[in-house]
């Protein structure tokens, strides 16, 4: 059976009545299963992650978006997380028997719908049709506050919807990407320089692994430094390889790993890779054997 | 939600029409999900593993058993696997929010039902009420062929059903136990003595870990020796501890691990332990995060 995932990031994390109405709109669609939901007051932002058939996920995302566009007013929005619109970012993520191309198609159908509601929409990642507008940070640069001025420039003509600033909804970024794994490694050190050195060994931008984004963070309450990572393609750049690299690089600093964190939804195929590496389980093993 | 598992071992693996009728009887009950099914011609035996609410699993097991008792005639059964009855062994296995005591209760309800069909039933493992009749090999000793004579002895008065040999159905063993993990470690050696030495270090009976049953097998077609194990309680004796012990014991023989096998249903909580040990994932990680 085809399974698609969507991860909707929308700009309301304080008024939980609005969050609930948006959630209800989504869950009114049969065949949608929520796998993770998170509302953050400081960010004033919520993230819903859900799966289903491509049809159900598209329909649910439309219903959700209609309600969010109705209830959220970006002219009044503040929050510490970067954002550009009421519906800020919507990646569609292949999970099972869905190709990247199919996910891109769904993203474009969604964009056409959202454009019809008067929202300018930009494609990113695998849906991007412009190499200069491929990553979220590039498209979202300057955030909501810069949008009116950006849209004076032909470069910012949207991929769907009106080429016109919409003060209430802002703009939305959608597209398709591989499931992302949030993986943090906590180090037994208070020396942020060790964390920064480790970041340099693994992050793509510094010569490390393609598909790894990483930053070093202080965690004073635990006397630790965290290497906080996003693995953007666990098939090509699996968890075990990043972790083992961090382990051997740490030896030069005489620093050990305190523990690690897997945050948010974890694809079962990433687990399979871990079993293959750490316990050498052979190819006969299928994730369908897992139960409970 | 409460989830119980049952693993029914019944004495038909050749006539697939009978296997199908038995399967259909089970699946006619709503809320039963098959997680594994296996029919072996040499063994002339099938194993169905399924989960559901305790009520659904009990009801499905009754329906299945009624059909198997009707269709299987033990007076005509041959096969290479030890067996004592048409419905040979039925463990009930707690999976989620079910206690061992609840599983024992279900086993006893099931035994009463089966006894009502004229089948002598013995309790084993956590349901056993007699320390000399706790393990399956002890109860099944001599197999079906010895049953008529055994039942002349007061010691073999069944826990449920008639105290009388039933030639057509034989006798059934039921009870409750922890989920069992079939874990095999394949060694890069053709020397069975190395396998036997490793078996001695891990199996309970030889001074190894409680909850480990193990034998060494030749695998001539792969030029390997296999340490074939059942882990009978992965909470108390987890996979990683057994595997790491095998690794360090192997160093004295200069033998390495070729690969490992996880056979049949694998409880997701056993996976969590592997993540905790091998990648040091911390307590915030929940198996509910796994999707796909």
Image (spheres, coloured by chain):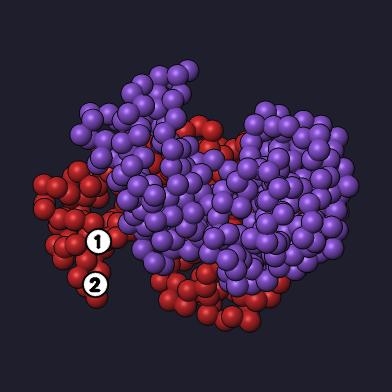
Chain colours: A purple, B red
- Check the residue under mark 1 and report the chain it is in: B
At x 53%, y 80%, the residue is: B14
Task: Work out whether B7 lies above or below A21.
Answer: below
Left or right of A160 in this view: B42? left
Q: Which x, y percent locates residue A61?
A: 77, 57
Residue B136 seen by the camera: no
Label 1, label 2: how far apart the Cα atoms are: 10 Å
At x 63%, y 43%, the residue is: A142
Q: Secondary structure at mark 1?
A: strand
Left or right of A26 in this view: A145? left
Residue at mark 1: B258
Residue A245, disc = none
Q: Secondary structure at mark 2?
A: helix
Residue B222, disc = 2
Task: Work out whether B96 lies above or below B56.
Answer: above
Foreground of the two, A290 or A185: A185
Q: Which x, y percent locates residue A68?
A: 83, 47
Q: Which x, y percent locates residue B169?
A: 61, 66
Task: Work out whether B196 lies above or below A186.
Answer: below
The mark that comes first in sequence, 1 or 2, is 2
Left or right of A224 in this view: B99? right
Looking at the image, the residue that sits furthest to the right is: A70
Foreground mark, 1 or 2, reads 1
Whether tag 1 and tag 2 are in contact, CB under 8 A, the answer is yes
Foreground of the two, A165 or B10: A165
Foreground of the two, A146 or A59: A146
């Amino acid at each position: 059976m085809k399974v698609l995932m969507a991860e909707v990031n929308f700009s309301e994390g304080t008024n939980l009545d609005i969050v609930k109405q948006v959630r209800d709109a989504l869950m009114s669609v049969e065949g949608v299963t929520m796998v993770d939901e998170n509302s953050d007051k400081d960010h004033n932002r919520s993230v819903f992650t859900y799966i289903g058939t491509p049809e159900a996920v598209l329909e649910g995302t439309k219903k959700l978006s209609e309600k969010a566009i109705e209830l959220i007013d970006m002219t009044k929005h503040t929050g510490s997380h970067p954002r550009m619109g009421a519906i800020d970012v919507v990646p569609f993520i292949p999970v099972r028997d869905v190709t990247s191309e199919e996910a891109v198609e769904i993203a474009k159908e969604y964009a056409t719908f959202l454009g019809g509601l008067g929202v300018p929409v930009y494609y990113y990642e695998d849906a991007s049709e412009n190499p200069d507008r491929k990553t979220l940070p590039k498209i979202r640069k300057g955030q909501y506050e810069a949008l009116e001025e950006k849209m004076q420039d032909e470069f910012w003509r949207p991929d769907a919807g009106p080429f016109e600033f919409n003060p209430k909804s802002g703009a939305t970024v959608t597209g398709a990407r591989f499931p992302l794994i949030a993986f943090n490694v906590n180090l037994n050190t208070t020396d942020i320089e060790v964390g920064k050195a480790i970041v340099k060994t693994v992050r793509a931008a510094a010569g490390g692994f393609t598909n790894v984004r990483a930053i070093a963070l202080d965690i004073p309450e635990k006397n630790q430094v965290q290497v906080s990572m996003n693995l953007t393609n666990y098939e090509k750049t699996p968890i075990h390889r990043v972790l083992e690299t961090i382990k051997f690089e740490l030896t030069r600093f005489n620093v050990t790993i305190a523990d690690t964190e897997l945050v948010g939804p974890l694809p079962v195929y990433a687990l399979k890779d871990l079993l293959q590496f750490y316990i050498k389980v052979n190819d006969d093993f299928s994730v369908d054997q897992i139960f409970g």
